[in-house]
Amino acid sequence: MNYLQIARDTLSVESLALMQLSQRLDENFNQIVELILACQGRLVIGGIGKSGLIGKKMVATFASTGTPSFFLHPTEAFHGDLGMLKPIDIVMLISYSGETDDVNKLIPSLKNFGNKIIALTSNKNSTLARHADYVLDITVEREVCPNNLAPTTSALVTLALGDALAVSLITARHFQPADFAKFHPGGSLGRRLLCRVKDQMQTRLPIISPKTNFTDCLTVMNEGRMGVALVMENKKLKGIITDGDIRRALTANGESTLNKTAQDFMTSSPKTINQNEFLAKAEDFMKAKKIHSLVVVDDENNVVGLIEFSS
């Protein structure tokens, strides 16, 4: 059996479904985005089974990108979880058929509370669609499942529609990387986006003078364990020597390099960054310049540290 061809056919069918979804969107989508933007409460998403799983992922995306959101399980809602709702919340209900019993049972309570309802369904004539304030069509021609049963294509379309809403809201809110980091303080992402250069820089610096001989320069670099030495004179930065500078000097001059001093093979006017810049900016700058060490300065341009980056 050619599983590779099955995979390609699957992706082709699902790609077509996404294109059809894109072409189906109309002014109704704009109205929903504006509704969510104006919401003073939370975006509450509910669904059963696969729709519920997709809803939970949508909640995670919305909540982490500036749209307060939580998942409400329709069944649990009848056993006290409706108490989490406020009239100012917007409720998005997902049901491909629009006739999921536990989902539709929520409608009278939501109407009584005064919540606006957004329906994600394939049936515009369904109970859910008829009672919703807004409807987004998640119709697919068929599930890519060979039996046309397992929610596959429809699940993907629903997920993609959620992403389209999230990206629209991110753009409308001018949501920036620093904003994103506030909700992701853990791990490397939070470290890069929240930390300042001064929080991560090395302050025990390998310093030499322009007249330092080659051997002493290597000694300082080895002791510093950063593969770099700062060439300073009268507390002013004159240059930097890296492992690469050492290799190039040896290649060009051979044994005569041993008779040279730091000023003969240092890189003059090394790149610097202010200690108050975000760590992410420093790393992006080093990537762009293809350097692994960056000199850190204060507002008076005094050398205060070194920052390293390993790609």
Image (tube, helix red, strand yellow):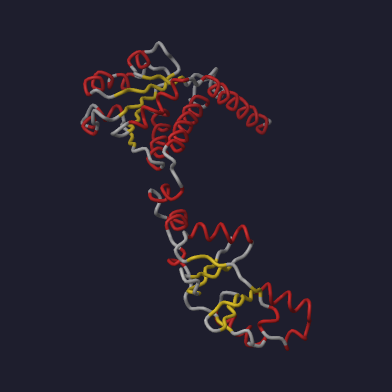
Where is residue 284, by image quadrant?
bottom right
Q: Residue 45: x, y in percent?
A: 35, 30
* The C terminus, quarter of image: bottom right
Query: What residue is at 48 percent from the left and 78 percent from the top?
Result: 204
Q: Is residue 6 left or right of residue 34?
A: right
Q: Is residue 221 above or below residue 90?
A: below
Q: Residue 171: x, y in percent?
A: 46, 37
Q: Is residue 278 above or below residue 264?
A: above
Looking at the picture, tell me which residue is in the foreground, 147 or 193: 193
Q: Is residue 114 left or right of residue 47?
A: left
Where is residue 5, by image quadrant?
top right
Looking at the picture, tell me which residue is in the foreground, 209 or 47: 209
Query: What residue is at 54 percent from the left and 70 percent from the top?
Result: 295
Please identify the residue farthest to the front as the structure is shown: 300
Q: Residue 143: x, y in percent?
A: 53, 22
Query: What residue is at 47 percent from the left and 75 percent from the top?
Result: 203
